[in-house]
Amino acid sequence: MRRTPLLSIFLLIAAAVPSWASAGGFVYPFDKIAATSCKWNSWSTLGDDCKIDLPKITGAEYSKFEKNQLYRRVYSVLYGATYDYGWDTGYGSHGGVDIATSDGTPVRSIGDGTVAYASWATGWGNVVAVKHTLTDGAVIYSNYAHLSKISVKKGQAVLAADNVGEVGNTGNSYGNHLHFQIDVTDQAHPYYYSTCAKGMDPMSVVNKGLCRDWLSRNTIDPIAFLESGKVAIPGVADSTVIEAVRNKPTERPDRTSMKTRAEIQEEEIQEFLKKNSISIGLSENGTNVMAGGTVWASVTSGDSRGKATRGNFPELGLDIVFDTKGLSVFPQKIVALDGGRRDFKITGIKPGVYEIAFKMGQTVIARRTVVVLSATDAKTTATAEIRAPGTLFLGEDKNLLVVMKTKYGTPLLDSKFDGRYKLSLLKGKAKFCNVSFGSKTACRSENLVEELEFSYADTYR
Ligand SMILES: [Zn+2]
């Protein structure tokens, strides 16, 4: 009860400070973010209906929001959580909070300060770090990682809410998001994996919760800091705030009742696929590629109104899964589309028939067959298929489309045997008589092509 009057005064002050009056106080790194249904598209293409106020985890009470779909999608990985769950604080050693929003979303400095770093860093991609001096001289650094664009220079003075860059997907990042971290020491960046877990895979360091002592020594929970109730008020933030945040007991939620990140991503993928179609620029009947040769193909995507998908696929992207003994594909993961389209290349390694699956999360969007041909395979017609309108009569001499096929059953598209044919049989093995050369009408022995197994597929089928 003793604290009630103080709290009231505090709330009064907080209410009396307009949101733009930030001198000396701290703000969130975002004002607006993309609504989750719009976050695949670039910020510059979003209408006002696609922009929402950044949801706040009031009081940094994560358990209150842990089942909330919007929060789980926006705050994809919390401080001290793992990548497997994202909200299992106390189990992992994620050094900041990941906030998912569109490519190009403006990122702002959380407080007045000086730009301490504005460049590329391994793992973090494009990073801006801002040094803030609190009222008692304590220093903190706010870090903004995976940016697509950096808008400030080292040494530059910034005010709270000044733009420092734009959200991106640079460095070790799958999907556009801001990695927002607060350091309370000036330990070396990038990543502590180069110190306490040297040489280890960064993902497994976080997922195993290694280096948590490093985490509590060098960083604080950025949400707990911004939600401390003091930092938004000019002239209040000092080292006692840092200590309070540091000593805040860590929640260790029950993971058995918690959705994993993969489950949340799967929901997002299904929503994305409901609104967007994806097509693969590869023949349904099989595509030939020479061993050692390369063919180009494409992925295109648009919404139901035919508007091209611009920006990112859901967080994990589109995976191209194939047999690496027979093929090589680049890229193997398509994360973003430029104007609704992304080209990829397929190189043949070993002759044979291979399936390529296009997967988004657990969902297979398409399967295609690719045939790798040896030089001999590519020259040898093994079978043929006749495509002709109407009825064919024995011995009839007619313009037909004859599709010559490799021994794998895929069309030999550049076959020399196209044109006018005369057939001696309608099914089985037959000699094809190509009478197209030189506009001949009679079938002479020199026009006989090799004996082939063929089938007849009329086009009205
Ligand atoms: Zn992160």
Image (spheres, grey):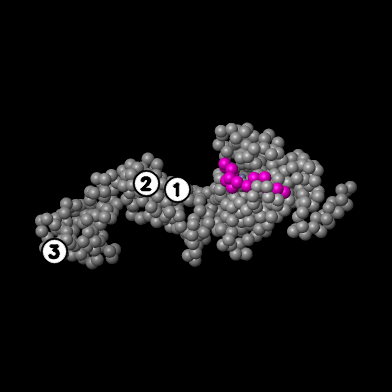
Q: Mark 2 highlights which residue?
A: 347
Residue 116 lies in the magenta-colored region: yes
Camera sees residue 342: yes
Splitting the image into 4 quarters, where does residue 284 fall?
bottom left
Mark 3, Cα crowd under 10 Å, few <14 / some 14-19 / many 20+, is few
Helix, strand or loop under label 2: strand
Q: Residue sitting at 68 percent across and 50 percent down? A: 156
- Residue 184 in the figure: left or right of residue 460: right
Mark 2, Cα crowd under 10 Å, few <14 / some 14-19 / many 20+, is some
Main SS category, magenta section: strand
How far apart, in angstroms, are the residues tagged by discs 3 and 1?
Answer: 49 Å
Res. 331 mark: 1
**Is the residue at mark 1 in contact range of ligand 1, meaning its CB lies under 8 Å from it?**
no
Residues drawn in magenta: 113-126
Identify which amino acid the numbered label 1 is placed on: Pro
Identify which amino acid the numbered label 2 is placed on: Thr
Q: Residue sitting at 64 percent across and 38 percent down? A: 188
Identify which amino acid the numbered label 3 is placed on: Lys
How far apart, in angstroms, are the residues tagged by discs 2 and 3?
Answer: 40 Å
Q: Evaluate if marks 2 and 1 touch, with contact meaning CB atoms under 8 Å apart.
A: no
Res. 440 mark: 3
